[in-house]
Amino acid sequence: MSMATSPHTLLQNRTTHRNPFPLTSQRASFKPASIKCATQVQSQPPPLTTQSQDRVFNFAAGPAILPENVLLRAQSELYNWRGSGMSVMEMSHRGKEFLSIIQKAESDLRSLLQIPPEYSVLFLQGGATTQFAAVPLNLCTPNDAVDYVVTGSWGDKAFKEAQKYCKPKVIWSGKSEKYTKIPSFHDLEQNPESGYLHICANETIHGVEFKDYPVPMNKNGVLVADMSSNFCSKPVDVSKFGVIYAGAQKNVGPSGVTIVIIRKDLVGKAQDVTPVMLDYKIHDENNSLYNTPPCYGIYMCGLVFEDLLEQGGLVEVEKKNKKKAEILYNAIDGSNGFYKSPVEKYVRSLMNVPFTLEKSELEAEFIKEAAKEKMIQLKGHRSVGGMRASIYNAMPLAGVEKLVAFMKDFQTRHA
Amino acid sequence: MSMATSPHTLLQNRTTHRNPFPLTSQRASFKPASIKCATQVQSQPPPLTTQSQDRVFNFAAGPAILPENVLLRAQSELYNWRGSGMSVMEMSHRGKEFLSIIQKAESDLRSLLQIPPEYSVLFLQGGATTQFAAVPLNLCTPNDAVDYVVTGSWGDKAFKEAQKYCKPKVIWSGKSEKYTKIPSFHDLEQNPESGYLHICANETIHGVEFKDYPVPMNKNGVLVADMSSNFCSKPVDVSKFGVIYAGAQKNVGPSGVTIVIIRKDLVGKAQDVTPVMLDYKIHDENNSLYNTPPCYGIYMCGLVFEDLLEQGGLVEVEKKNKKKAEILYNAIDGSNGFYKSPVEKYVRSLMNVPFTLEKSELEAEFIKEAAKEKMIQLKGHRSVGGMRASIYNAMPLAGVEKLVAFMKDFQTRHA
């Protein structure tokens, strides 16, 4: 790897045999804030193009790999954030330092996704699973019909939770075909009296991803999408949606932060049984500061948003993601059946790539050998088996190239 | 301050004029894990007795000051946790590394509070405010009566949220006396048909703290306590409680983690409208891993628990907290009325010390001058005014001594 020589090199190679937590190859590679923050950084070190030798390639489905330069920057300012004399973890959520952090995070996210002003951005807790309840609690009455398109396990969980709060109907399910497809939108029999249409934009376990979105034909014209596992992986026309929600722990930060983007006219109609913490109105009125938010997680998301902007925004990010996915799917499809992708080609996820071995008895060996080569978390979800490579934004091209080279070598040895 | 000379000194003084994020006086002062973890540290550097020059004394009510050695340890392993090649923020919550972290955190917390085996420990999200709903949703039916003792704003919020899910009654309120008292337990008219008795063990805003606990006289014998702001500040007999809950961001970690300690026989009775994420049974059955938990926050709590154990446990921690509080209350009481504490002496909080100036027009000046001396966040809550010094576990004695010296000097100059 190339060593940064900028003045921002805070932490240098320091390894001793007696040091149990080696900080080898650390570089504080940070970049200028895209809008002003409490303290501004002026200059810029060379960008990272690969990752340090002591890092593993982590193909976990989430929590997942984070950009190396974001981690190094977080490390450099963990103990004392920009001369404040405090860690971000110690800051009052109502102090000027943290307010500058959350406001910048929101502003950068708005830039990334070009979020229209008539949408609110909320930084919440509880994961997408909490949103499975919050969406029906906020958007409909107990007697309202709502439509769910179920293209995988997460969409199914969302549907089941909604049964507590309204009358959801599954208008299409991919279950009988093991969740390998996305329906043709023309075939969807949407209920015009429905309160909303719900989709999961990318099914993390099954690796099926919407490449376009159905037009909601319901009374409110509301499309709701769980984008947990492809949030900020590509440009999205937010104006097509009533609500977008996403757990941060795939593409944009650590676990413990959930981002909700909601059209403002949908806020303020929560059912009486809605816990105050699930009421969008409360969080909207208080700019996500009704109670103490997950401050450090929001800070980390903010660093990731900065990094994505500095990469050129989501158009550039999508190009990289397409290239990585193409290499991996080509390796699978070009293996003469040694590796197989169960998902229909046109809806294969750019983020989560499940695959199986024709000789399934070799799968454990595959995972074990890959781990020895520092490629970890390749085991498929327990509900589907096989392998799964999650190649989120932060997975370097080098990680995918290394995996593909390993796959070819493994095939040669076991064909 | 004394400089550590142990082999664990990972980060050394490195300041250059061109470095925007100085890492001065950093020391990785960590200590052996109290139970085995994925990787074990064998030796121990000298303990910290004060804090580094570049730190402020942060009197915020929460998020709040964290132990300096915990922050330094977190910093040293942020980028690469103990040779795993990953940050804790990147780890799968189902991988062996994170499982070792959460299991050790629970085990250490059980040691600290001597939690009996018939209690479950849950690591959740959403803050105490989410528990304000979860407690009634899990412990009673919509028609159940429950009793609330309201000794401050947080107890009042808990009561109001419970109105959505059962029939709560305020059996004592300190509101008319501006929340400066705790009632005599003999005077409480508990409803024998009540589902539980709820208290807030320490009111963060008003600085009133239960020094002992009422015996619940209800049908289930259940006392529920919000311990957010005095959790792990002193020994507590957990067996007296049905449920203890606490946001982490005062004494034990960053915001975004909520700890629930619940007697197991109370689990499994959630109302039908309970969001799955508020159902204790789901989290209990899944060891807090039903969905992705706030992994990094749990890791930080684990580091704090280790630190508290290494200090000798909560008996020793309480001694330190009593000493700090004594010094500060003595300064207030010994000021001939220049400073005033509104709270009755016998229930003054060891954690949050609100006080006013006789000459209230000087309060803004007091806060401003203190900030110049690197003592920050001394402004009282907006609902009560005046000043508030939060002196949680992690506030060094030196911080309180410095504050008291400043108070005396300020009085001399303005008497």
Image: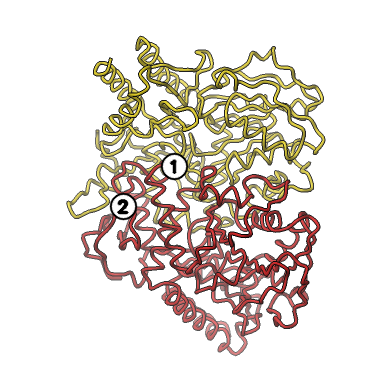
Chain colours: A yellow, B red
User: CB atoms at circles 2 and 1 under 8 Å apart?
Assistant: no
Q: Name the residue under label 1.
A: B94
Report the front residue among A272 and A295: A272
The residue sitting at 54% across, 44% down in the picture is: B290
The residue sitting at 69% across, 12% down in the picture is: A186
Left or right: B9, with B49 as reference point: left
Q: Mark 2 points at which residue?
A: B17
Name the subunit of mark 1. Answer: B
Report the front residue among B320 and B178: B320
Query: Mark 2 to mark 1: distance in Å?
Result: 44 Å
Left or right: B180, with A31 as reference point: right
Residue type highlighted by circle 1: Arg
Report the front residue among A381 and B26: A381
Q: Which numbered circle lies on residue B227?
A: none
- The percent coordinates of residue A11 (x first, y second) are 28, 48
Name the subunit of mark 2. Answer: B
Residue type highlighted by circle 2: His
Height in image: B375 above or below B342? above
The residue sitting at 42% across, 27% down in the picture is: A388
